[in-house]
Amino acid sequence: MSSLAKSHRSVAANAIYGLLNPIPFGLFVGALILDITYANTAVMLWMKSAAWLLVIGLLFAVIPRLINLAQVWVTSRRFATRADRLDFWLNLLAIIAAIFNAFVHTRDAYAVVPASVWLSLCTVILLSISHILIAMQPATAGGYVHD
């Protein structure tokens, strides 16, 4: 996000966003690893653990998205870059994929395998693209401001 957009944003909102935004990514990567492990071993512990990681990741994903929604689309709409908006949409699509994945995990254990791995992979890829997109933005003139 540009330095001009940073100056119009709440410091507390940026701090909460910066603290909570990486948590869902780690939880969704963990769910992907556990889904792959379950697909290879058929031990139900891995499927149940992946379901818990998905739910916790979804709970942690809501607050940063609400802050991002307010900052990109409401308060500093004029200063938000194209990458900021694309980051919002990619994260929203990843959350939708994770919600569908959570519903897939409510099925019988043997009916979970193909869909859960693909939805977890889709979630992680969307979040990875959004993180790479934000990381590739040019640094601000006054130094790098981490979001």
Image (tube, rainbow, N blue to C red):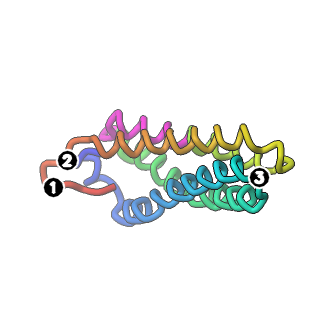
In the picture as drawn, the residue positioned furthest to the front comes out as 41
The number of discs equals 3
Task: Return the residue at label 3.
Answer: 42
Q: Residue at x 66, y 50 (%)?
A: 35
* Cβ atoms at labels 2 and 1 below 8 Å apart: yes
Query: Would residue 128 appear left or right of 135 to someone viewing this image?
Result: right
Is 73 part of what is drawn in magenta? no
Q: CA distance from mark 3 to mark 2?
A: 46 Å
Which of the two marks, 1 or 3, is nearer to us in this view?
3
Q: Which residues are magenta?
A: 78-92
In the picture as drawn, the residue positioned furthest to the right comes out as 108
- Is the stretch drawn in magenta largely helix, strand or loop? helix
Name which residue type carries label 2. Ala
Which of the two marks, 3 or 2, is nearer to us in this view?
3
Is 80 part of what is drawn in magenta? yes
Q: Residues within 10 Å of mark 1 (few under 14, many from 20)?
A: few
Q: Which mark is residue 70?
A: none
Q: Residues within 10 Å of mark 2 (few under 14, many from 20)?
A: some
Residue 125 on image: x %, y %: 50, 40
Name which residue type carries label 1. Gly
**Is 101 situated above or below 27?**
above
User: Quick one: SS at disc 3?
Assistant: loop
Q: Which mark is residue 143?
A: 1
Q: Nearest the camera: 116 or 80? A: 116
Q: Quadrant of residue 31 in the image? A: bottom right
Q: CA distance from mark 1 to mark 3?
A: 50 Å
Q: Which circle's residue, 3 or 2, is located before the other in the chain?
A: 3
Q: Residue at x 70, y 45 (%)?
A: 101
Task: Return the residue at label 2.
Answer: 139
